[in-house]
Image (cartoon, rainbow, N blue to C red):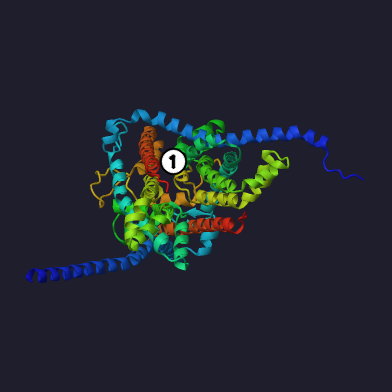
Amino acid sequence: MAADNKNRTSVSEMIEQQKRKRKFFNQLERMIPGLLLIIASISVLTTIGIIYTLFAESVAFFRNVPILDFFTGTVLKPLSQNPEFGVLPLLNGTIISTVIAMLVAGPIGMMSAIYLSEYAPDNVRRVIKPLLEILAGVPTIVYGFFAFTFVTPLLRMIFPSIEATNILSPGIIMGVMIIPMIASLSEDAMSSVPNSMREGALALGSTKLETTFKVVIPAALSGIIASFVLGISRAIGETMIVAIASGSSKNFSFDITGSMQTMTAYIVEVAGGEAAAGTTIYYSLYAVALTLFVFTLIMNLLAKYISRKFREEY
Amino acid sequence: MATKYMDAELVGKRMSSRVRKNAGWKGLFFASTLFGLIVLAVLLVRIFTQGIEYINIDFLKNHLSTDASRAGIMGAILGTAWLMVVVIPVTMVIGVGTAIYLELYAKKGKLQSFIATNISNLAGVPSIVYGLLGLTLFVRALEFGNVILAGGLTLALLVLPIVIVAAQEALRAVPGSLSEASYGMGATKWQTVRRIILPAALPGILTGAILALSRAIGETAPLTVLGIPALLIPFPEGIFDTFTALPMQIYYWTIDASLVAEYANLAAATIIVLLVLLFLLNSIAILIRNKFQQRY
């Protein structure tokens, strides 16, 4: 009888234990979504953090420098006795380096995409695509080194008037860096054009080239343009190549054989120079970064809008 | 009057020029594709020939020095390693957690699409802007100073979108039949996620994480903003020590090459070390992908 009793209690104990255990797991189960939401919100907090710091410190900057002077000033002399903070020289450098990069990356990336998507046999594509990915994986500091120590001397052998730091050589190398991006995104867009459309054009007697230019590219245009816009955004935000190879001249000029400073390179120069917190030059970092941030954000949103809005559905 | 459908003669006459045009453009397209690869080849050959003779045991294990013949990069190697000690756990926990939330827990709706849009926008923010965030938040506001923890957290935030997107894709690729079988056996949602879905998605997650890591290792711009010293500093021994890192070392030697010409060669040698490291990491990623690639 006693053993029976003991047994019974132990069973009910086991049930109790099981209940407690289940209660714990149930609680855990209910807590998990909340915990994961907290983790997921860190990326949102990052965005808020970026926008808040850029705005808050820029406001401090614009208290010292009128906002109109900043955006219309063609003179940037942050370190002089009477400092002037016009952003136009930096904008000018950024735009010129971006244009040079896109003149290289646009046509070459696009033609690579056409080759890979329309002409290349499968085995060639299988070799070339990973190699292009390597090109995209090289750290930008390596490109900067290459532009400064190889491309610039090479250019100076051909055109002796080029300065030791100039915007042309980093612009070209930035273009090379962006080629794989444009090539692979444009190729994706072209590959997703259905084969029936190509076959239709070929059956009507078009050559492959005519099919490509008159059927495939128009059909894939939204994706191709989006890839260009993303390339531009990448070029605007690129830092190390221009910081190393383009020098720090803040002149407002259009001479691509001379030194120019981009917005990104300015941030590197000023932040690396240990600008004391609270000075106008320190706050100018944030005003420039805010301008940079807005530019790239607009480009990224534009790319998204183009590829969504003008996508042809088949 | 008979309708003229096609002038066979005219078409025939133009045919050969059209075919030739096609062949010519094809050559141009191929040459363009080769252009990028040729630049890559020139870059690698140039850097290897310039730097290879500077690589020896002393170069790898010595302290930094202003004397080019005695300078070593052990401090930079350790700095990069310590950075990874911070970056890996932070990105794995936050990246995978966010991906699990978005793919498996979040209801399709405004909140989920808001977070997803936010992540894709973050991926497009220039890395130098992350540097300013790190400078303001970690170095100054939280008063870490320019130590490994600050650098590591900055880099972690920077590569987070890459890890999240890769983990999302890996989770999405796990077939629904697996989790349904788990539910059918009476498992709860978290049990299913932890024991079934995560292990199945792990190779994909690891591949993405390693690629993100190699991005973080080569990233220079955010570190320049944090104010990493170029001076001789002791080897870092923990996450609260000041540090230098491989890309920072390359940067300082490159910009100082106009003062001491030999620094350019040291920079090239450091680049070789960095590239070999990245090559190893990428090989591991490819190995994992090939070995564990399961087809359901």
Q: Residue at x 51, y 42 (%)?
A: A180
Using the image, determine if residue A226 lies above or below residue B263: below
Q: Secondary structure at mark 1?
A: loop
Residue A90: x and y in percent read 51, 52
Mark 1 Cα-neighbour bin, 10 Å: few <14, some 14–19, many ≥20: some
Q: How many marks?
A: 1
Residue B200 image position (x, y, % from top left): 37, 51
Q: What's the residue at 29%, 37% (across, down)?
A: B65
Which quadrant, please, contains the C terminus of chain A? bottom right
Q: Which residue is mark 1?
A: A138
Q: Please state which amino acid type lies under the numbered disc 1.
A: Val
Q: Position of residue B243 (x, y in %)?
A: 29, 47
Asked whether residue B198 appears in the rendered view, the answer is yes
Quarter placement of the N terminus of chain A: bottom left
Quick one: B121 or B57, which is closer to the camera? B121
Q: Residue furthest left?
A: A2
B41 lies left or right of B271: right
Question: Is residue A258 in view from this perspective?
Answer: no
Q: Nearer the viewer, residue B23 or B260?
A: B23
Q: Quarter-wise, where is residue B267 in the image?
A: top left
Residue at the extreme right of the image, as rendered: B1
Q: To which quarter of the image does residue A38 belong?
A: bottom left
Measuring 45% from the left and 60% from the top, which residue is drawn there? B116
Q: Chain of mark 1?
A: A
Residue A43 horizontal/vertical position (percent): 40, 60
Say left or right for B68 vs B130: left
In the picture as drawn, the residue positioned furthest to the front comes out as A1
Indicate whether A149 appears above or below B185. above
Q: Quadrant of residue B168?
A: bottom left
Whether residue B250 is situated above or below residue A39 in the rendered picture: above
